[in-house]
Amino acid sequence: MNLFLQHALTGISVGGCYALIAIGYTLVYGILRLINFAHGDIFMVAGYFMIFSFAVMPFPVAIIVTLVATTVLGIMIEKFAYAPLRSAPRMSVMISAIGVSYLLQNLATYLFTALPKAYPAIPGLKKVITIGNISTSLVTILTPIITIVLVMILLWLVNKTKIGLSMRAVSRDYEAASLMGIKLNKTISFTFAVGSLLAAVGSILYFTDRMTVQPFSGALPGLKCFVAAVFGGIGSIPGALLGGFFIGVCETIIKAVGLSTFSDAFTFIVLIIMLLIRPTGLFGEKNIDKV
Amino acid sequence: MLKVENLKVNFGGIEAVKGISFDVKEGEIVTLIGSNGAGKTTTLRTIAGVVRPASGKITFDGEDITSIEPSSIVKKGITLCPEGRRIFPDMTVLENIKIGAYLREDDLSADIERCHRLFPILKERSNQLAGTLSGGEQQMLAVARSLMSKPKIMMLDEPSLGLAPIIVKNIFDIIKTINDEGVTILLIEQNANMALRIADKAYVLETGHITIEGTGKELLTNPKIKEAYLGKKN
């Protein structure tokens, strides 16, 4: 029982990180109908931002610098790689996204070498906490809490604020939104900013646990979170949250029963099964194509 | 007030609007009629700034507004109530009304009141998702949404599309009321009969050209128009 709880906690924690990244996929998909393949790599670059800023400044400042730099990176990628293709077929934008993904991976390899770099330990986060018979680190408990709080803030932002209203309008109908006076580019930039910011938070929590970053650190988590977003219904924020937790918990359980090498394959089996039986995911929109 | 000069617009690889000129005076109801594919919708979308013209000039109150951002156009007091209504189906009726006032920072309550006075049904349905409204109600919502930007001129693209005759009459009555309250109207319609009845000035658009123009009354009695657009022969 203890062992089960221990694993469940780890799974929920990993799932929280996945959820934060998955939301980035879902937000961007919702507004641009684009799978932002570079999203996992933005998450990886956020890891390097933390390593380098931590080396030269106190950790609270380093965290802020990481969050801001990642947000700016997300906005810049949209400006340079996606915005010029606004009226191009969706396939072109997706290819551009794949290009950005490889660019970030290879740029990171060139600049920082492919050797894993040690991720800094944020004071306090790795502190061991014992609840009953379960002992775990603070970051494991903190991750799902931070995730849920951020998701609640995000839902408030989307449903109750003016910028959220414009995000919902743009994701539904570009032209009708611009006829209301909503600026498309501003709204899209904002969406990328939010997605990247959440990825940066996810990155800090994830790498604090993993302790190293290398240029391909973002690739597999990125794909898994994409699966999480599809599982929950791409375009849906609660869906991405649920998908993230689901993938995280399943993966941990599979590892716990001794099938570690199978756990990644499992994620993609989930993807295929979901696409076969319910392509719109748990909470996905029924008709994605606009008339 | 609104002046279009020699406007040419390419759309989907063809020249959809081939050099048209017309003007709309303050307080008037002006209609562009014409069959499918005549270039009516493209003309309005170009004025609204969502399509860029190939050449020509659009001026509003003497100011050149050709090719400026749609949001700037809305700010200047021009609104387009688009074809097919294009309401936001997964927002509530009230959210749809409010989003029409997206660029405004002032108090909206008086204008929401006005919309509810013009369309009492929208008040009843305030918290319902807009996608669950009937076609006629959606059209009313689209008009209400456009009104919320406090336009000087409202452009309406086929407000009668797919609606029952009784609802069409209702919508046209409201367009007339809105006009009486001081909003200039530029209306495009396939339902030429209804449009010409309320129009001060009318233009007939055929495959990208203006072929006939006159007052609403003149065009209603013009034999060519009768035959081609009103379905009556005499």
Image (cartoon, rainbow, N blue to C red):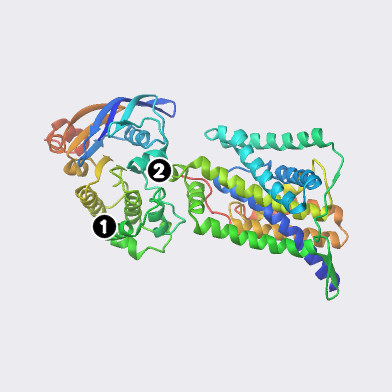
Quadrant of the image occupied by residue A132: bottom right
Q: Residues within 10 Å of mark 1 (few under 14, many from 20)?
A: some
Where, quadrant-wise, is the N terminus of chain B in this rendering? top left
Location of residue A229 in the rendering, given as x and y in whole percent from the top left corner: 65, 53
Location of residue A160 in the rendering, given as x and y in whole percent from the top left corner: 50, 59
Taking B228 as reference, is A202 above or below it?
Answer: below
Taking A145 as reference, is B8 above or below it?
Answer: above
Mark 2 residue element? helix
Residue position for label 1: B118
Taking B126 as reference, is A34 above or below it?
Answer: above
Where, quadrant-wise, is the C terminus of chain B in this rendering? top left
| Left or right for B149, reference A9 | left
Q: Residues within 10 Å of mark 2 (few under 14, many from 20)?
A: many
Residue position for label 2: A179
- Residues at badges 1 and 2 in contact (C-beta under 8 Å)? no
Q: Residue furthest bottom?
A: A132
Q: Chain of mark 1?
A: B
Residue in the foreground of this view, choosing between B88 and B149:
B149
Q: Is residue A149 visible?
A: yes
Q: Chain of mark 2?
A: A
Amino acid carrying mark 1 in the image: Leu
Mark 1 residue element? helix
Measured Cα–Cα span from mark 1 to mark 2: 22 Å
Residue in the foreground of this view, choosing between A243 and A210:
A210
Amino acid carrying mark 2 in the image: Leu
| Left or right for B143, reference A181 | left
Q: Is residue A282 visible?
A: no
| Left or right for B181, reference A41 | left
